[in-house]
Image (cartoon, rainbow, N blue to C red):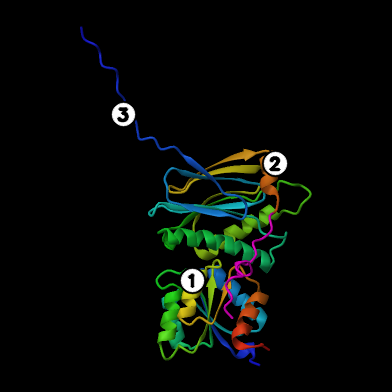
Amino acid sequence: MPAAAAIKVLVVDDQLTMRALIRSALQEIGFRDIADAGDGEEGFKALLQRPAHLVISDFNMPKMDGLGFLRAVRAHDATKKSAFIMLTGRADKELVQRAMQFGVNNYITKPFSPLQLRQKIQEVFGPLT
Amino acid sequence: MSIAPSRVVAQPPLTRERMVHVVQGEYAVVQETNVVLTTILGSCVATCMWDPVAAVGGMNHFLLPGDDTSSDSVRYGVNAMELLVNGLLSKGAVRTRLQAKLFGGAHVINNLSDIGAKNGEFAIKFLGMEGIPCVAQSLGGDRARRIRFWPTTGRAGQLLLDASTPEVQLAERPKPAPKPAASAAGSIELF
């Protein structure tokens, strides 16, 4: 049973407010080691410098969107093992299917509560302590 | 016998304005120059946002659920704002060029807590955090507002209304916060 506090997380979203909300939800769940980035390009660089067990990324972002970011993460030896949860603005079936093809681990539709986020993370990591 | 030609005045092409009404909980993003976005606000807030270079703009209309600023309430508001911003970006707007005008947030019903003020405060705080300039605002007071917004130019106008106007009463009725679409999209079962 993994401890949330031991899981390193990278949050990628172009909206500062959304990053702050996700960070706050993660802290509520028990995560302590949380980094963030404003788009896929920045997120990928951050991930190379500081590997994370879990990436939570928005889809709609400038420069490199969530799918591009996911592909980059899966294509690189240093990052390909990170769990990846995609945030979507709505239940976009096509987007989710494409993300599945590129190796997404789970997805969550905004807006979501800390409880829903916890459930999505547990579906990937198993029950958290 | 000569007949004087009748005076011919060049007429601009007919571009009839098309009104698109944005109701509570919804948003609209348009690029058509003849579209005017309209809404009626009591304690709700509408964010009118546009990129003057890309000539694209939009409006949302939200009422934070509950009368506090709990995280649930803020999440709902952030989502309403994000839908508008993402809608604009997807139509060619550039985040650093976005400008906004805020309307609404009135205290129209005396016996309720001032949810209007909280809606307004949330919107101002959001724009501040995201670095989107709020170039004009008309928030608070005790009158409802009818808003018209020309999204490609950023021009906006408001008309103050009496809170007892039926359409204000209708607009003021709280609507349930949108549920996360994941539960609505039961056809997508991934894990």
Label 3 CA crowd tier, 10 Å (few <14, some 14–19, many 20+): few
Q: Position of residue A127 (x, y in %)?
A: 67, 88
Tell me the kind of residue under disc 3: Ala
- Residue named by callout 1: A95
- On screen, B186 above or below B166? below
Q: Which mark is residue A84?
A: none
Asked if the magenta segment contains residue A104, the reply would be no
> The residue marked by circle 3 belongs to what chain?
B
Tell me: residue A6, above or below residue B80. below
Amino acid marked by disc 2:
Ala
SS at badge 3: loop
- The image's mark for residue B163 is 2
- The x and y percentages for residue B155 are 47, 45
Query: Numbered disc 2: what chain?
Result: B
Instruction: Please identify the quadrant where the C terminus of chain B is shown.
Output: bottom right
The x, y position of residue A106, in whole percent, is 56, 79
Q: Which residue is mark 3?
A: B10
Q: Residue furthest front?
A: B187
| Residue numbers of the magenta segment | B175-191
Please tell me whether mark 1 sits on a helix, a strand or a loop. Answer: helix
Task: Residue type at mark 1: give it.
Answer: Leu
**Along the polypeptide, which appears first: circle 3 or circle 2?**
3
User: From this viewpoint, is residue B89 visible?
Assistant: yes
Q: Please give the chain letter of the residue carrying mark 1.
A: A
In this view, the residue in front, B23 or B163, is B23
Q: How far, Cα to Cα, is label 3 from label 1?
A: 50 Å
Q: Is residue B112 left or right of residue B139?
A: right
